[in-house]
Image (cartoon, coloured by chain):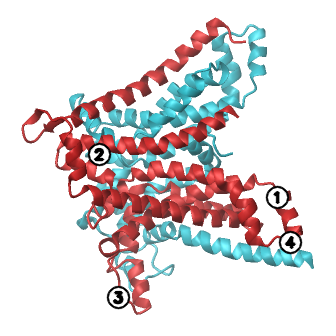
Amino acid sequence: MARSITNNRKALNTAIAWTIGLLIFFPILWTILTSFKTEAQAIADPPIFLFFDWTLENYAVVQERSNYTRFLMNSIIIAGGSTLLGVIIAVPAAWSMAFVPSNRTKDILLWMLSTKMLPAVGVLYPIYLIFIKMGLLDSRIGLTVILMLINLPIIVWMLYTYFREIPGEILEAARMDGASLRDEILYVLTPMAIPGIASTLLLNFILAWNEAFWTLNLTAAKAAPLTAFIASYSSPEGLFYAKLSAASTMAIAPILILGWFSQKQLVRGLTFGAVK
Amino acid sequence: MATKASRSAARLMMAPAVILLLGWMLVPLTMTLWFSFRNYLPLRGGDLGWAGFDNYTRFITSSAFWPSVQATLIIVGAVLLITISLGIVLAILLDQPMWGQGVVRILVIAPFFVMPTVSALVWKNMFMDPNSGLFAYLWKFFGAEPVSWLSEASLPSIILIVSWQWLPFATLILLTAIQSLDSEQLEAAEMDGAPPLSRFLWLTLPHLARAITIVILIQTIFLLSIFAEIFVTTGGAFGTKTLTYLIFQRVLESQNIGLGSAGGVYAIILANIVAIFLMRIVGKNLDA
């Protein structure tokens, strides 16, 4: 009796949750489906859900017309470069705060976090001006540095929370055995920290990939990543649903897949360890 | 425990991150502050000298200011209300036993990973377009007149798009918090005959209070500076000009740097008020 009630309830839960889940996911699903339609089918009345002539043509056209690969490469270089650079700078800082904490560590961490709260628009012109003066406007390097700086606080924080979970005794034991600071980092800490570093890389790559204030305002043609590429479709002449969908699908697919792996890190990375 | 040598090594290791962030914070901030007191119009003669607090008073007395504050507050408030209330419902639902829980979780979280320009463009064209958007078909199907969402119901449309993007974040964090709730307590309450609503009100909700506060603070900081969603959809027209967008227009479109910078200073102050509360909570958690 009790069993059948729980099973009934489980079935009900399942039905409700799947309905809501699919509803929330629907815009993405619809975009992916539309990307395989012809333009005529994409705006057919009534809308066609599944039974259309599946075609890959839109993907070929988007690539051919807009040189999609170039934007993709820009995204990969800027998001990847900024994340990698950020981690290289953050690892030593997070390491020292986690293992050689002083009474100012907490203040430094909180101060770093506070730089993340600075609204981008408040410093838009200074950055724009500096970029013009240094010839960095519409350059990958400039954007890489900016994205590195805006994500650096999150990177330091994430690494710090991961490093803190590494037992300090292991480091002390290594020190007793005569390991130098360099050895400690290279042979003891690094292997234990790799999962945490990987999660940090993953989440921050996603954040940098989707960043859409600086990428829109500081690029034109040369260094524009996918965010800017998609925004260029908002002009009226670019209004072809199937092609828009193909371009969108290509821009979000890699991140959707990476994102599914980073669910857990998302909570840690974006709440600064305040929700566990 | 830590030797003197390791302390100075630690300081050295922190230096690059600290110096970079210090520069990132101080240099542009000082420049913004400086410009905000200048009559600076790059396209109309450049720096025309000291302006005192003129830019500050002009920014808040301009006809665009209060509507922009209003639009900002409506968007932030409505998105918070929607994402948190739906987030609580979804988190409780996802915490129940069901088949295919992992897949549902993935479906619910997916919108968070869609880049803002894509979600804005997809919603704008494929759903909200008055001629060939899905909503138009749906409205026609039920015999109603299709709505041109982004001009006739611009704020609700933006709120819908932004809520869709942030609902996964709220859900995920609230779900994490719910999973740490002691299930024995809930079961005991159930045994004692507490109805579901009072169990929710007196056990689940208080347990979630902290997580909800954190979601509110973090989302507020991000929502205050939403940009791409408006840039791509309405371009600030139809009453969707937020404070962030207004400053963007002053700075890059009309190139009135002094005025825009004064606006920027206001935005920074506003964000800092929220940030102080967030820092307090995060800071407390560091001690624990």
Q: Position of residue B16 (x, y in %)?
A: 47, 20
Residue toward you, B34 or A243: B34
Q: Position of residue B210 (x, y in %)?
A: 64, 50
Query: Which mark is on residue B145?
Result: 3
- The relative height of residue A194 versus residue B201 in the rendered view (above or below) is above
* N-terminal label among 3 and 1: 3
Tell me the amino acid under the disc marked 2.
Answer: Asn
Query: Which mark is on residue A217?
Result: 2
- The relative height of residue B22 versus residue B170 in the rendered view (above or below) is above
* Chain label for disc 4: B
| Image quadrant occupied by the N terminus of chain A | bottom right
The CA span between labels 3 and 4 is 50 Å
Residue toward you, B190 or A1: B190
Circle 3 or circle 4, nearest the eye: 4
On the picture, is B274 further left or further right than A132? right
Q: Position of residue A45 (x, y in %)?
A: 38, 86
- The relative height of residue B260 versus residue A253 in the rendered view (above or below) is above
For image coordinates 22% across by 45% down, the residue present is B57
* N-terminal label among 3 and 4: 3
Circle 4 or circle 2, nearest the eye: 4
* Residues beneath discs 3 and 1 located on the same chain: yes
**Colour used to depict chain B in the structure image:** red
The CA span between labels 3 and 2 is 38 Å
Which of the 4 quarters of the picture holds residue A46? bottom left
Asked whether disc 3 touches disc 1, contact meaning CB atoms under 8 Å apart, the reply is no
Tell me the amino acid under the disc marked 1.
Answer: Ser
Residue on which disc 4 sits: B193
* Residues beneath discs 3 and 2 located on the same chain: no
